[in-house]
DNA sequence: TTGAAAGCGGTACCAA
DNA sequence: TTGGTACCGCTTTCAA
């Protein structure tokens, strides 16, 4: 059974396709109420739905935005995406997801694909939009927004929290509660999004409190995973058994620290305090529950998509720095 | 700067649009090598990319599939989506994600949207495709696949694990290791996907082992969350303090049980054994690490998308039951 | 090897 | 209030 088109409807209802189109688009004028009724019935009876592709062709609107993730698996992307989808939905846009795996070639490929599909805007999430893509981005001539990431390309708004400030606050929180033997479990130090800024925040807080900061107090890893956290913690304890408090650059890493501490017979928070980063659902599931820096990913995704949609509608938009806060649970010993 | 069209390219290259089209589509004949070279250069120079919308209109191919989730937040959907995207990508399809929030109206709305956008197939994930949508599904006349869910509508293939069998195995695993005082922490009992079948599997395993099964041994909750797990466990211990082993219907619930057990001074696995369900990343992060039934969500998503794409290409496809296995970690006391 | 032209399913302008 | 029609960007058939 072939799909019926506007032509079929027009024929069935004995009117012109122009009339059907007007009724479909609720122009308000251009048809009598009687005609309207009749046509609507015909449409209903035939099970006709307009072809969005044809519509898109004529007014150059695909009603679609693209979202690029390094990987959609994982709590963080999931929550970001959830927020994005909700906002997009409110603006009548569909969301196409793309998994770049952090591969520049794949990224380029996806951008091209999105271009060809005539997306009206792009959210570049969780990664750095390098100048390698500058040409493509300019060519696409649609709004871009980076989300929980950064852009080397000028004029692209960023939606994120101030990572350095948040790390500073987290570290200060530990210091405020009487800790002076701190260490940091970090992700890749060259990661310009979640690596460098968080490390800088940590260092700065130590400096401002006149606490020393040896290189060995910061242990970095290939990624931000549970296993990385475990491993990094082992390294830290090898160098600094005197450590009483740890700042972890992600909740997953913090969970790794908790797990490894437990394995070593170190009690949390009695012997060792831990503060995490992200406030994913995981944070309330650890034992003890994790005190952590909250990034509201759902909200971030939402705001990014909102911004993008505004920009699509021609409004001027600017970068957005979302506020962070420390969510207190039970992993920090408050002296 | 307006986007250039095939017309612009043709004019610039001094050939007809037909020739450009042929070259673009690599038909292999219909142009000389010289023309080809020249046109390709022009295309490159102008930064031209074909308009997929216009292409789609003519050959009725949107190159897009739709995926409906009750909620994309959460580990499970994230991993499913990851697998889906990877397979879709291999078949040159883009993925539009939709968040139904388990709301029938929203679901209907999304189906309609996907219909209008001319998607070539739909994956209905993590939910039950009720007969309410039968009319719409038939009308859309594109392949559907349910993923980690079920369908009331006939002829729609399902990709999932055998939940009842997996639950049976999990329960039997506990029994095999010497436990006879079992209880189950379940999700909604009326949930035809992850509720009923898992409960049945649990009951069956008890029956086959000649163990009694009182209603109070199964505690059900509104959802499958951490908090639900905590709460359900409290209820169980109130009724059955003699319980030595728990089967939880999700890893999150199991994490809740672990957390609550810890709060009550019950040692895991010494006093209480726990087996979970899903094998999400969470399972290795709990302390002790969770023994659990593995569903490979990434693979499931992958297979579902593969199947769907095959179906789109006209092949006959059938339901797929993925194998489960028990991943042994440290939450079960093996006597 | 090439180009002209008829659509694909709609929208929107203009005339009736 | 209506209908006729040009056109959106591309593919494809048919002639040249």
Image: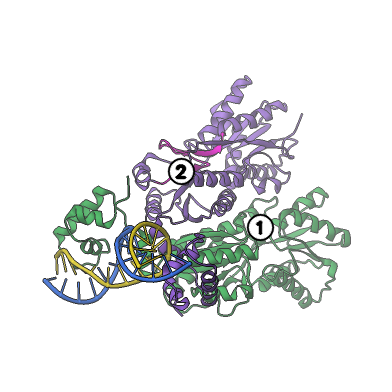
Chain colours: A green, B purple, C blue, D yellow
Does residue A302 appear in this view? no
Residue with the mark numbered 1? A329
Quadrant of residue A34 in the image? Answer: bottom left
Q: Residue at x 59, y 52 (%)?
A: B86
Q: CA distance from mark 2 to mark 1?
A: 55 Å
Quadrant of residue A128 in the image? Answer: bottom right
A166 sits left or right of B147 in the view: right
Residue with the mark numbered 2? B314
Residue A147: image x %, image y %?
57, 68
B69 up-or-down from A32: above or below: above
Is A255 contained in the magenta span?
no
A149 sits left or right of B335 in the view: left
Q: Which residues are magenta?
A: B142-162
SS of the residue under disc 1: loop
Residue A266: image x %, image y %?
81, 52
A128 sits left or right of B318 in the view: right
Is the N terminus of chain A in the top left, top right, bottom left or bottom right quadrant? top left
SS of the residue under disc 2: loop
A240 sits left or right of A174 in the view: right
């Amino acid at each position: 059974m072939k799909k019926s088109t506007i032509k079929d409807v027009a024929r069935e209802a004995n009117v012109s396709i122009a009339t059907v189109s007007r009724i479909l688009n609720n122009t308000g004028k251009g048809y009598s109420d009687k005609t309207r009724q009749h046509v609507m019935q015909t449409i209903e009876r035939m099970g006709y739905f307009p072809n969005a592709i044809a519509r898109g062709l004529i007014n150059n609107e695909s009603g679609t935005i693209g979202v690029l993730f390094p990987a959609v698996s994982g709590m963080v992307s999931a929550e970001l995406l959830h927020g994005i989808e909700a906002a997009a939905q409110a603006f009548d846009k569909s969301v196409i997801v793309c998994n770049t795996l952090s591969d520049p070639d794949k990224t380029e490929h996806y951008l091209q694909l999105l271009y060809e599909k005539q997306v009206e805007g792009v959210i570049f999430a969780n990664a750095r939009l390098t100048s390698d893509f500058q040409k493509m981005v300019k060519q696409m001539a649609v709004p871009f927004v980076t989300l929980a990431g950064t852009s080397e390309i000028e004029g692209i708004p960023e939606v994120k929290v101030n990572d350095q400030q948040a790390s500073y606050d987290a570290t200060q929180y530990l210091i405020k509660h009487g800790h002076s033997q701190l260490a940091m479990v970090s992700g890749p130090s060259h990661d310009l999004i979640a690596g460098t800024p968080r490390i800088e925040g940590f260092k700065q807080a130590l400096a401002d409190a006149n606490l020393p900061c040896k290189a060995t107090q910061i242990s970095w890893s290939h990624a931000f995973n549970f296993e990385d956290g475990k491993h990094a913690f082992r390294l830290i304890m090898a160098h600094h058994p005197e450590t009483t408090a740890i700042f972890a650059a992600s909740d997953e890493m913090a969970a790794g620290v908790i797990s490894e501490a437990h394995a070593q017979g170190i009690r949390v928070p009695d012997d060792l305090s831990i503060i995490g980063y992200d406030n994913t659902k995981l944070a309330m599931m650890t034992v003890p529950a994790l005190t952590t820096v909250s990034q509201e990913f759902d909200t971030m995704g939402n705001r990014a998509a909102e911004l993008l949609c505004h920009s699509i509608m021609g409004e001027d938009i600017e970068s957005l720095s979302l506020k962070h806060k420390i969510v207190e649970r039970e992993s920090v010993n408050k002296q």
